[in-house]
Amino acid sequence: MCKKAINGALAPAGAYNPRMRRWSYGLAVLAIAAYGGYWLSIARSLERGLAPRAATLRAQGYDVTWQSVAVGGFPFTFRLRFAGAALRTNRPAPLEARSAELIATATPFELETWHVTAPRGASLDATSLAAGIDAATLEGSVATTDEGTAIDIAAHDVVGRGLAHGLAADTFDAALTLPRQAPQSHRDPALSLTASLQQATLPAAAAFTHGKIGVLAVAGTFDGRLPPGPLAPALAAWRDDGGTVDLDRAHLQWDGTTIDLAGTLALDAAMQPEGALTATVVGADKAVDAAVDAGWLAARYAGVAKSVLHAIAATDAGGTDALHMPLTIEDQRLYIGPAAIAVMPRITWQ
């Protein structure tokens, strides 16, 4: 063995070794090059897959468009920046969502979850209602699992336009779950939704709640298959097949009063909502006062109404008066028990 090799072999640990250093540099360069090739390959695949994916969604009734898209984020993320992004759909109602700038990011080794932001804001229009809402900023995520797709959205500084003029909320949160498999019967879920408004002003409720509410939240499941095509015949087919909406909870809180609803809704032969619900009201005295302020109840009947409510209210474990009552929607009328208390507005499906 040559002297140089013997000296290298006998070199103490930690001693300077030019050959090992060159090998380390070489391996590092190869690793960086391999990772760069992987990142570039995935980036190109993502960009090439956008148009086919949009075509698939279009066939399902969702028209997704954008003015331009740029791919970036190397080395630690994949970032898709869409300019002039829009989504138009007639399901479950004619809607159009737009954003001047939409950014989607994911890590290289977790492409099943994408984080989405709209730093310049976003808007949603219900075209058939001439109503829309705008959000100053939006953030959320889209995750694909074995069970389906989960979409979470948080919109901030929300304001209304058109018929929604006067609507305002600090935050709007929504979580939407779409199962991987389309419903095969009326018992299978097509989507599950949980949504809430925090510290909101509702124009439609202004007369009753003085426009201010603390929380408005809903959670439920849309069961049954909604076929493609125009909304009215699609809903008719969904109804005829036994489709329902399971309302797990609708919660309204304002000024010391809370109202909770739960039950099942469907469409009747005239394509109008029908269903059976249960309601729980806490703080019914303030609800009576609000009805008087709104002109729904004469002031001279307020005392009698409060006495009746207290007489029939159940008391929970915490000592709070809670009024429990059955609600029915039938033939465009709202019933409490056997008594019809209101006529429901007629809905014309476009």
Image (cartoon, grey):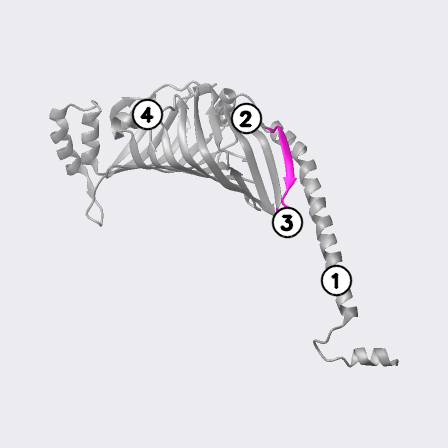
Q: Secondary structure at mark 2?
A: strand
Residue type highlighted by circle 3: Pro
Report the residue marked by disc 2: 88
Q: Nearer the viewer, residue 159 or 314?
A: 159
Give the residue at mark 4. Answer: 204
Work out how far the residue at label 3 is from the one at label 2, CA to CA, in angstroms: 30 Å
Local SS, label 1? helix
Locate the N terminus and report the quarter of the image it occupies: bottom right
- Disc 1 from disc 3: Cα separation: 24 Å
Q: Nearer the viewer, mark 4 or mark 3?
A: 3
Find disc 3 in the rendering and name its residue.
108
Residues marked 2 and 4 touching at CB (< 8 Å): no
Q: Disc 2 or 4, which lies upstream in sequence? A: 2
Q: First in sequence, mark 1 or 3: give its number.
A: 1
Could one spot residue 337 in this view of the protein?
no
In primary-sequence order, the first of circles 2 and 1 is 1
Q: Earlier in the sequence, mark 4 or mark 3?
A: 3
- How packed mark 2 is, by other alpha carbons closer than 10 Å (few <14, some 14-19, many 20 or more), is some
Three-letter amino acid code at disc 2? Arg
Tally of numbered discs? 4
Q: Which residues are magenta?
A: 65-77
- Name the image quarter holding residue 115: top right
Mark 1 or mark 3: which is in front?
Answer: 1
> Which residue is disc 1 drawn over?
25
Q: In percent of the image, x 62 and y 50: which residue is there? A: 76
The label nearer to you, 4 versus 1, is 1
Tell which residue pokes out farthest to the right in this image. 2
Please provide percent x and percent y for residue 212: 29, 32
Mark 4 residue type: Ala
Q: Quadrant of residue 285?
A: top left
